[in-house]
Image (cartoon, helix red, strand yellow):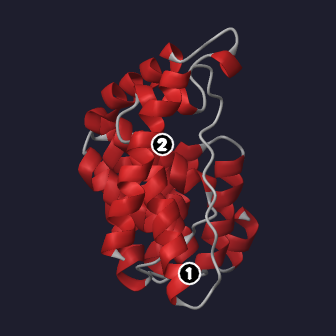
Amino acid sequence: FRQAIALNPDSAANHLNLGIAYYQGGRPAEAKPAFQKAVTLDPDLTMARLLLAQVLATTGDLAAAEQEYNQVLAHEPGNAKTLRGVGFCRIRQADYHAAVTAYQDATKAEPDNADSWSGLGSAFLGLNELAEAEEMLAVVNSMWEINPMMGLRGCRAGIMYEGLTEMQTRAYFQAACRCAKRGIDVHPEVMIPLVSHVNELKLERAKLEKVAQQVMEEE
């Protein structure tokens, strides 16, 4: 590549290839000027800008890296790789709100890219979502049982967690009513599961019948 540059020093592609060779060889400090030269020769060479931004970000020059990413976004606002780069820079600068925005845009541009979702998760953690996550995990851990079939399952989950039975009943009967309006012959059947004592049945049945009646009156 150096020989190619010697023969054609004004070729942005030659400098880009040299930068890639250095970068892949674990020599980012030497890759940086090669990418910078490629960008100078061809400001619209997106790959050169992206690689330059990556080198700048990995070497700690986050402001310069983001500037290069923003240059790409000015022409390609939906470039998911670039948006992830902006998100990374913002996380490193503890600007988690901006990082969330960048990674959310990246997930919209490439919904199937795991790196975008992982970055978004990291950004949310930076916004102190960790405390909420730990609280939820504590609730999950509190449900651990030796014999789940006899523990917090079925009707007992609805008894312990307020609103659970009502939510499920409302959704079920709303669907039934709306199907009936469309002319579908509907015969809902409701089971109160895993009852081990008559009082469990009484509690759940009372909630279920109340909500079912409300939904049928509303619909």
Question: Residue 116 location, x and y as percent?
Answer: 53, 56
Residue type highlighted by circle 2: Thr
109 left or right of 128 in image: right
**Observer-nearest residue: 214 or 94?**
214
191 left or right of 75 in image: right
Question: Residue 110 location, x and y as percent?
Answer: 57, 69
List the single residue furthest toward the bottom.
183
N-terminal-most mark, 1 or 2: 2
Label 1 environment density (alpha carbons within 10 Å; few <14, some 14–19, many ≥20): few
**Observer-nearest residue: 76 or 116?**
116
**Observer-nearest residue: 50 or 26?**
50
Residue that badge 2 annotates: 58
Marks 1/2: CA distance?
Answer: 57 Å
Question: Residue 7 location, x and y as percent?
Answer: 70, 78
Location of residue 41 with respect to 80 vertically, above or below? below
Q: Residue at x 43, y 75 (%)?
A: 40
- Badge number at residue 179: 1
Residue type highlighted by circle 1: Cys
Residue 17 visible, this orientation: yes
The quarter of the picture where the N terminus appears is bottom right
Q: Residue at x 34, y 53 (%)?
A: 100
Residue 79 visible, this orientation: no
Depth check, mark 1 against mark 2: the one in front is: 1
